[in-house]
Image: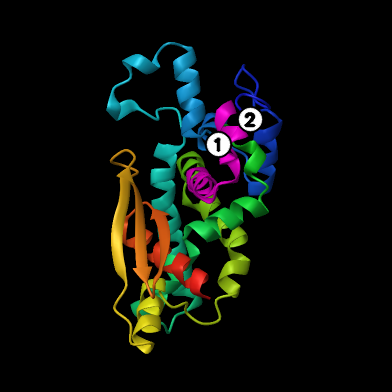
Amino acid sequence: MSGEGLLDDGAPGADVVAVEARLGYHFRRTDLLREALTHRSAAHQRSAGSGRRSRQPASRRGAGSNERLEFIGDRVLGLLMAEWLLERFPDEQEGALGPRHAHLVSRPVLAAIAGAMDLTQALDVAEHEARAGVRQMANVLADAVEAILGAMYLDGGLEPARRFVRAAWNDAIIAQARPPKDPKTALQEWVLARGQPLPSYRTVLVDGPSHAPRFVIAVTAGGQSGEGEAGSKRAAESAAAADLLRRIG
């Protein structure tokens, strides 16, 4: 987008109005929705163009992007999903609810939600990143969905965020007839059943700001490897195990 579809006078442009329609929610503060749709690269591009980037301290890098809204949106989604699961499965305990929750707030599910919303073209990214296909990346789409939830919460409280979650995740939660097995557990069971050594996890990369870190973890088992990325080491290990399970079928 990089400014396309947004008006300079603060009025919402076509993309913002379209996203509001898909959310079923009208923002009182459209600047929050704009921010939720702004990728870090677009914020950097604008600050560089204004000459502010060189003076920006490390703690302010990413300012103007959706990272802060993603931070709170992640917590909002976690709370609302936990609340919903308790209502929907009143007889289940933490051992079953935990894997359900982990799956429903996972990056692939969030990216699928973004795809169903046709969110790709509404994202504001730097021109060079757009050419590189950043708008189609699962982690970028997932982060945008969390940021939108954070924006909805700050604009209107939990209720509009709750309505959106229960509408957008309805098919995903209905599909969970049985609790999904945690990928790390499933991978461990797979290797043990074949008399092979336990999976080995290795941290490949840790970066990002302190409030929104990014972990990249690699796992090796059965002579093959997988890789996962998430905002916590535990979630990244789970994503890596899921990736390896897909590779080994």
- Give how far across and how far down residue 127 sits, in percent: 59, 27
Quarter of the image for the N terminus: give it.
top right
Q: Residue at x 47, y 60 (%)?
A: 106
Give amino acid for label 2. Answer: Met
Furthest-front residue in this view: 223
Left or right for 218, reference 244: left
Q: Which residue is mark 1?
A: 37
- Give how far across and how far down residue 103 sits, in percent: 47, 67
In space, the residues marked 1 and 2 are separated at their CA atoms by 9 Å
Q: Residue at x 30, y 46 (%)?
A: 206
Mark 2 nearby-residue class (10 Å; few <14, some 14–19, many ≥20): some
The prevailing secondary structure element of the residues shown in magenta is helix
Q: Which residue is mark 2?
A: 1
Q: Residue at x 49, y 14 (%)?
A: 49
- Give how far across and how far down residue 243 sits, in percent: 47, 65
- The reply to whether the C-beta atoms of the residues labelled 1 and 2 are less than 8 Å apart is yes
Furthest-top residue in this view: 51
Q: Quadrant of residue 170?
A: bottom right
Q: Is residue 34 magenta?
A: no
Q: Quadrant of residue 193?
A: bottom left
Q: Which range is magenta?
A: 126-149
Residue 247, visible in the rendered structure: yes
- Mark 1 or mark 2, which has the lower sequence index? 2
Q: Which dot, 1 or 2, sits closer to the camera? A: 2
Viewer-nearest residue: 235 or 165: 235
Residue 93, visible in the rendered structure: no
16 w.r.t. 88: above or below:
above
State the SS at label 1.
loop
